[in-house]
Image (cartoon, rainbow, N blue to C red):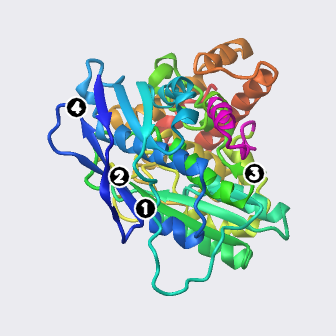
Amino acid sequence: MTRISIPIAADADPKKEVSRLSLHLEGVDAPAPIDVDGNALLKVSREIPDMAQDLFTIASCIYAADKAVARTSVDDNWTREIAIEIPIEHLETWSAVAEPFSKTVSYLTGDFWQISFRKGEKRLIQRRIRKRSIPYKRAHGSAVALFSGGLDSYIGALDWLAENTTERLLLVGHYDRDVSGPGADQRRLKEVCDRFFPKRTELAQAQIGLYEGGADTNFRSRSLLFIALGCYFAEVMGDDVPVLISENGPIALNFPLTPARRGSCSTRTVHPEFISGLTHILREVGISNPIINRYDLVTKGEMVAGCGHPAALHAGFALTRSCAKANRRTYWVNKKGALGCGLCIPCLFRRASLHSEGLDTELYGIPVESLDNMIGDAREDILALVTFLRTRHSDREIAARLLANGRLSMEKLSDYVDMIKRMRAEVLQWLKAKGSPFLQNEVRAC
């Protein structure tokens, strides 16, 4: 088991307005400094939340630890055991939920976490004393939207703005110095929002991660960090202000396309079981802001077709990024100009969703139009997708596969099954129209 302690340095970082935190991994001499930019948060609101600041501290430390511990260090090259002690303000409150919190994070990342807490010497956000008067600034709006730079989060923001015609929306983005793209993507999409919804959005971005790379690049815990960022501002704005997550249902459920893709190797970043478990914990500690994914029964294609502001969608969709392997370009055919690999599940679902609206016009690293085989690690996902498309699953089989990946509401199970069937039809229609002759032949009888 990897044991991690996180001391707080005596001095704060005045430039970033945060306490200096470092991961101290057992058996490793050099500490791993955590990179948190508090100044970026304080630019949006000079007010600092209380319980949600603890949650933000916890999520930042877990995200950093998730990056610092290599999966290759364990026997199965995947399931790590991590014990971590995190400094927070409200020790008694968080200690009471340490066990369920550990189980929830374990489900999220596919590991075994033992999370404990201790009283911190100081809080994470350390607003410096200014020599001159600074006008007080408070985050405001009727909702907080997690704004990743992806297509779903962009559509979610457009839908909310189109439906709430006079209200303001706070967009919350996270980026990591280790990953190029998301920070700039979020800013470019904010500019498009400003063009169609002037003076109705504000963007709060935070850079969080490790100062020096990381041993693991799965980023499973990023959704916890994103939600914590949303709650950070929502607490300042009001107890009833919702934190909006926009993720299409098939990706949120991460339906296992083949039996081999079930279990801990299947991502659960927005799975209903994770969201439900986290929501219950937050209620226990006094964070009451609702966490909502209104698209949990909607396919990605239905999100595109039903977007509340088609003009803004057409203007900005090409600036979004959906690829799970955007920084692994070794085997790409088109290394310049492509934002996505073209063969990971998020890219494949993206293309299928845009196809029916005539928007599948982008350049990809490995386009399915020219694919002549399914050999090689880069083609694992398209092989799994074709295997799924070629098998006519019964409703019972789909339900069993869904339940094998996590707990779901039995009242909604038949709705989830229907959604998976619609997703299958959506992807099949696109692949028959756009796939290479090789792929079209593979799915011809489907």
Residues marked 2 and 1 touching at CB (< 8 Å) = yes
Q: Earlier in the sequence, mark 3 or mark 1?
A: 1
Q: CA distance from mark 4 to mark 2?
A: 30 Å
Question: Is 8 displayed left or right of 142 in the figure?
Answer: left
Of the two numbered discs 2 and 1 in the rendering, the one whose residue sits closer to the viewer:
1
Question: Dot 3: few (<14), some (14–19), or many (≥20) neighbours within 10 Å?
Answer: some
Q: Which mark is residue 26?
A: 4
- Residue on which the image places disc 3: 239
Q: Residue at x 57, y 28 (%)?
A: 97
The answer to which quarter of the image holds residue 218 is top left
The image shows residue 23, relative to residue 267, as above or below, that is: below
Any magenta on residue 286? yes
Alpha carbon separation for disc pair 2 and 1: 9 Å
Q: Position of residue 15 (x, y in %)?
A: 36, 71
Residue 350 place in picture, x, y as percent: 58, 48
Give 20 or 356, whichever is nearer the viewer.
20
Q: CA distance from mark 1 to mark 4?
A: 33 Å
Viewer-proximal residue, 135 or 77? 135
Q: Residue furthest bottom?
A: 132
Q: Are marks 3 and 1 in contact (CB under 8 Å)?
A: no
Magenta residues (range) = 277-297
Q: Earlier along the polypeptide chain: callout 3 or callout 2? A: 3
Tell which circle, 2 or 1, labels the residue nearer the N-terminal end: 1
Secondary structure category for the residue under label 3: loop
Residue position marked by numbered label 1 in the rendering:
181
Depth check, mark 1 against mark 4: the one in front is 4
